[in-house]
Structure formats: C-alpha cells, structure tokens
Image (tube, grey):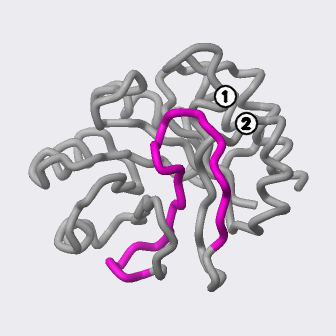
Amino acid sequence: MFVKVCGLRAMSDVDAAVAAGADAVGFVFAPSPRRVDAATARDLGGRVPEGVLTVGVFRDQPLAEVLSLVEASGVRAVQFHGDEPRSFYEALPDHVLIRAVGEVVELGEYGEDMLLLDAPTPGGGVAWQWTAPERAGRWLLAGGLDPENVVAAIGATRPWGVDVSSGVEVRRGVKSPELITRFVQAAKSA
C-alpha cells in the first residue's frame, strides 16, 4: 500500500511520516492553511530519504509559477489539484505526475503517472462515499481519511494507495506526529 502524507510544514511531521514508512510526503504550494514556500519545502525535503517521494501540490496556478516553485523546492513529483491543461503535464517530463480528480477518469489521459481520487471538496476532512475506478492502476484514495477509517476505506475500494492531510491534524493546518504514525501504520497493515 502506497501512503502519501500531505500538507507537511514542520520537521517533526516529516520525520514522523518517514519513520512510520510513508512512501511520499506532500508540500502544498497552492493557497491553503497548509501552504509552504519553496525554501521551506527544500529544507523539509532535504530530510527525506531517496526512496520517499517529495510532492509539490498546485491548484490552478500559472505554469511559470509552477515551474519556478518546482525548481526552487527540488520536489521530485508534482500534483495538480485543479483544472490544469495537458500542457502543464507535458512541461514536466522528468517528474512523477499526479492528477487529482473528483470523479473517476481513466489513468494516463494527461500523461500522469498516478490519479488521486479526492472528495468533492478537497482538504475539508470530510469522508465521502468512496468510489473505486473500474480499471485497476496506480490510483490513490483521498478525502476524509484518518487513522480510524483508513482500513475500512481501503477494504471498500482496493486502491493502489492512500493520501491523507486533514485526517492527521489536531487543528486546521497543524499536523500531529502521533496521528501521522497511526495513519501510516493502519494503512500499511490493511
């Protein structure tokens, strides 16, 4: 089970995610209470071993801004969480590309490496009626997941991986290393 912990802003959170066995850590560059700048993402990403993917998350930002932040932060993957056109994906051929969607679509339509199937209102921490794509592939389930429901969500949808952000927070934008550890362990055991 591939596990991504997103919206990280503190060294303790990155350390907890890595120690628990997360496969990817996400840094939000889009407007959000979880937003970080490129320098912070570079510092946090510098603590991540080579085998753990560092992901920059964007939402409807200009391509020039995306490219600048990707270069300055050093992230190895890019997640588009808006209505970015195919040309954005084509502009980043050397990065792992994740396309976040709110409805089931076919993997690879924009040249993405993974799909992230999220709640209708991303980042709200509200569980939704989880749905699985008809075709298997590299897709992540997100939206309202937390340490208590992730095993049931995995059982119901059989995703390739899961992504969490608000489900491991003590308040909006502030992560809990304990919740991060519990989430990753629960997801990996499912």
- Going by the image, does 98 lie left or right of 31? right
Residue at 70% from the left image edge and 21% from the top image edge: 177
Task: Tell me which corner region of the image, top left, top right, bottom left or bottom right, holds residue 90.
Answer: bottom left
Tag on residue 90?
A: none
Residue at 12% from the left image edge and 50% from the top image edge: 62
Local packing at callout 1 (Cα closer than 10 Å; few below 14, some 14-19, many 20+) is many
Up-down relation of residue 7 to residue 3 (above or below)? above
- For this orientation, the residue located farthest to the bottom is 135
Q: Nearer the viewer, residue 24 or 186?
A: 186
Q: Position of residue 16 (x, y in %)?
A: 69, 28
SS at mark 2 in the image: loop
Q: Position of residue 49 (x, y in %)?
A: 59, 44
- For this orientation, the residue located farthest to the right is 189
Q: Is residue 67 visible?
A: yes
Kind of residue at disc 2? Asp
Give the mark nearest the N terminus, 2 or 1: 2
Local packing at callout 2 (Cα closer than 10 Å; few below 14, some 14-19, many 20+) is many
Kind of residue at disc 1? Val
Tag on residue 146?
A: 2
- For this orientation, the residue located farthest to the front is 129
The answer for how far apart the CA atoms under marks 2 and 1 are is: 6 Å
SS majority, magenta: loop
Question: Which residue range is magenta in the image?
Answer: 108-132
- Going by the image, does 90 lie left or right of 168? left
Q: Position of residue 93 (x, y in %)?
A: 28, 72
